[in-house]
Image: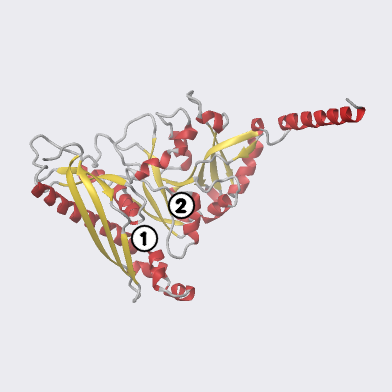
């Protein structure tokens, strides 16, 4: 080998060693990062924020693949702004905070009523925060909610937060509310934002009034009859007008909300049994196609027609029931139609008359009635929505039980 080639080889070897080992001393090394899994934001005295950070004790990548349970670290700091809180926590931890794995951002109900636009803008402007991180509104303090969250079936809290909203597709009890969607709806002139309603499952199991089927559909966070090691729960929807919390939806109202937005696949409801007085039937429903929505904006009182179809099966059966005959199934279908039409109508009028908030996004359908942006802007949809009238039409086809059919 010539001297020139030998020098080139030695130089390349030195460069390779420099590149290979320089990461060990970099400030962005994995060992020098503190991974945030969740953020809780509460109001404090003197217009300050109390911000709680939940850290993973290991890298989220290695934690999600491990079967060994790890306990997160939860620390709280009080500061004038969210940015200052992050900076102070950076100083306290001695490691650079990394929020690229943050899965949930929890606001206390008290702070949400005051308005959370400053915090939303700060978070969405942070390149580490992913648009898929879920926004949650806690009935208790955000700090207490994070401390009470102890998943039972997952070894990793990171994995638990990651799959938290999966149940929305088959229960309809919570919306899939990401910070990206929240921010987009905050800017939208045809809709309003929502968030997941959460709390702690500390309802009085002995004296609770939510023991029958009718009351079960009216539950929301902080009211469920759950008993387990995980002290937190997520049921219901937080309704916003602009950046301020204006109300809450319970379980059946959340199902109604997700149905109007075509964001639910199937769900279980309890309807009055038309055959046995005082009893209820559990019916599993699946949405048949996209709902039909028509909006008339010829006056300042929008007229909204909402039509949807379901197919369903009776989920609760008894040996002496006559739920296999076509006549009985037709009666149950009609009962289900009446129940859902009444339920959806109550939800819609509540959003208009009580909340003054178009969370279903009917304003986007109303845009089809205008030829120009100035026409739609002058109509002022978000202001006129409170004057809306609704026409709800539900067509349900009920079959017998999941396995039982009459031949």
**Left or right: where 269 falls relative to 361:** left
The 10 Å Cα crowd at callout 2, few under 14, some 14 to 19, many 20 or more, is many
Q: Is residue 217 above or below residue 191?
A: above
Towards the viewer: 31 or 47: 31
Where's the C terminus, which quadrant? Answer: top left
Query: At which x and y percent is residue 264?
Result: 34, 49
Disc 2 vs disc 1: Cβ atoms closer than 8 Å?
no
| Residue located at (37% from left, 44% from top) | 168
The 10 Å Cα crowd at callout 1, few under 14, some 14 to 19, many 20 or more, is some
Q: Which residue is mark 1?
A: 355
**For numbered disc 2, what is the local secondary structure?**
helix
**Left or right: where 280 falls relative to 202:** left
Query: At which x and y percent is residue 366?
Result: 38, 68
**For numbered disc 1, what is the local secondary structure?**
helix
Where's the N terminus, which quadrant? Answer: top right
* Disc ID at residue 83: none
Query: At which x and y percent is residue 351?
Result: 34, 60
Q: Which residue is mark 2?
A: 112
**Mark 2 → mark 1, Cα distance in angstroms:** 15 Å
């Amino acid at each position: 080998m010539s001297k020139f080639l030998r020098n080139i080889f030695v130089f390349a070897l030195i460069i390779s060693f420099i590149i290979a080992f320089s990461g060990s001393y970099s400030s962005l090394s994995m060992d020098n990062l503190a991974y945030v899994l969740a953020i809780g934001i509460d109001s404090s005295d003197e217009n300050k924020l109390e911000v709680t950070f939940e850290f993973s004790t290991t890298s989220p990548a290695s934690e999600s693949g491990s079967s060994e349970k790890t306990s997160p670290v939860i620390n709280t700091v009080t500061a004038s702004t969210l940015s200052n809180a992050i900076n102070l926590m950076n100083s306290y931890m001695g490691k650079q905070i990394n929020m690229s794995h943050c899965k949930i951002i929890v606001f206390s109900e008290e702070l949400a009523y005051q308005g959370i636009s400053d915090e939303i803008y700060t978070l969405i402007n942070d390149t580490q925060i992913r648009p898929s991180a879920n926004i949650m509104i806690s009935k208790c303090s955000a700090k207490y909610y994070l401390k009470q969250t102890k998943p039972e079936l997952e070894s990793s809290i990171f994995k638990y937060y990651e799959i938290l909203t999966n149940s929305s597709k088959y229960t309809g009890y919570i919306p899939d509310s990401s910070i990206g969607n929240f921010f987009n709806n905050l800017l939208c002139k045809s809709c309003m934002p929502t968030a997941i309603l959460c709390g702690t499952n500390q309802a009085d199991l002995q004296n609770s009034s939510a023991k029958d089927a009718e009351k079960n559909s009216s539950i929301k966070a902080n009211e469920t009859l759950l008993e387990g090691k995980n002290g937190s729960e997520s049921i219901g929807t937080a309704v916003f007008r602009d950046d301020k919390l204006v109300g809450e939806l319970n379980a059946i109202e959340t199902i109604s909300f997700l149905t109007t937005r075509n964001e639910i696949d199937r769900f279980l409801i309890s309807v009055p049994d038309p055959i046995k007085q005082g009893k209820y039937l559990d019916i599993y429903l699946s949405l048949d196609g996209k709902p039909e929505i028509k909006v008339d904006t010829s006056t300042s009182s929008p007229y909204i027609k909402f039509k949807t179809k379901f197919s369903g099966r009776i989920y609760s059966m008894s040996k002496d029931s006559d739920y296999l005959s076509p006549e009985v199934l037709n009666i149950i279908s009609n009962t289900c139609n009446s129940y859902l039409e009444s339920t959806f109508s109550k939800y819609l009028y509540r959003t208009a008359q009580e909340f003054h908030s178009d969370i279903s996004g009917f304003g986007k359908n109303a845009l089809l009635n205008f030829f120009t942006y100035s026409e739609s802007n002058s109509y002022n949809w978000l202001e006129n929505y409170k004057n809306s009238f609704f026409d709800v039409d539900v067509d349900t086809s009920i079959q017998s039980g999941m396995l039982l059919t009459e031949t």
